[in-house]
Image (cartoon, rainbow, N blue to C red):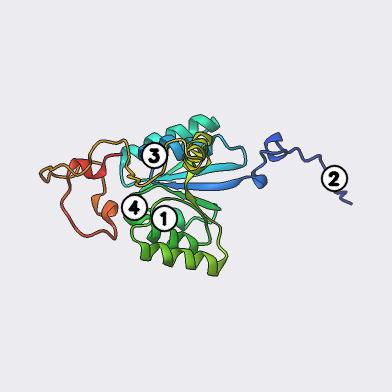
Amino acid sequence: MLVAGTAPLVLPARLFGANAPSNQITMGFIGVGHHGRRVNLTSFLSEPDCRILAVCDAYFDRRQIARKDVNARYGNTDCTTIADFRDLLARDDLDAVAISTPDHWHVPMTEMALDAGKMVFCEKPTLTIDEGRRLADRVKRTGAVFCTGLEDRSVMHYFMMAQAVRNGAIGQLKHIQVGLPVKPIYTHQDPVTPPPGLDFNMWLGPAPERAYTPQLTDP
């Protein structure tokens, strides 16, 4: 006669507590250039309730650097690099995606991510007002979880400056000129061959076809 025996099942501590996998949102990052990596990726890496599993970029070098950042933060080698964002969206182990690509990709990628059942954090702006209206209507209609990157609106000194202006600190406001403190990006450059490691056709995507110039894909 055989007697079935039992043995204690020992589970690792990482499966329990606030940082257990079941308590974390798994994420993929599409676009890990300057802002996508140094701001968005870095910010989400500091959040204990999410886990980054994959990074994607049209540049080979950028996705490799981002992967190193993720693995260094988690102390493992689990992060995957993906060249085609559609392969990232097809993964069923990702709950959400962060999209930090050029503007012309924002809405098409977001729509494809929503179709894939992902929650979405996407940088602004939409390429056109019409695209923005279409996306807003779609999110409302589907009840999808969508957030756009307007982090400056939560910076306290901006609130303080706006309050001062509204209270008359600089007199009557008659004209507002908006700009960004960045280098000019539309100076003339002659077309050249895209650098090794860049899938320029993927970078262009839905944008009108054009020749590559170095300033075009600056991070």
Secondary structure under tag 4 reads: helix
Please tell me how many numbered marks the rendered image carries.
4
Task: Identify whether 118 is placed above or below 178.
Answer: below
Left or right: residue 91 versus residue 6 is left
Query: Which labelled disc corresponds to residue 35?
Result: 3
Disc 1 vs disc 2: which is toward the camera? 1
Task: Identify whether 60 is placed above or below 124.
Answer: above
First in sequence: mark 1 vs mark 2: 2
First in sequence: mark 3 vs mark 2: 2
Q: Amino acid at mark 4?
A: Asp
Q: Amino acid at mark 3?
A: His
The residue tagged 4 is 103
Instruction: Answer with the quarter of the image where residue 69 lies.
Output: top left
> Dot 2: within a 10 Å radius of its alpha carbon, few (fewer than 14), some, or many (20 or more) residues?
few
Q: Residue furthest front?
A: 171
Q: Residue at x 40, y 44 (%)?
A: 173
Secondary structure under tag 3 reads: helix
Q: Nearer the viewer, residue 73 or 77?
A: 73
Q: Amino acid at mark 2?
A: Gly
Disc 4 vs disc 1: which is toward the camera? 4
Please report contact status of discs 4 and 3: CB closer than 8 Å, yes or no: no
Q: What's the distance in space between the residues labelled 2 and 4, CA to CA?
A: 62 Å
Please report contact status of discs 1 and 3: CB closer than 8 Å, yes or no: no
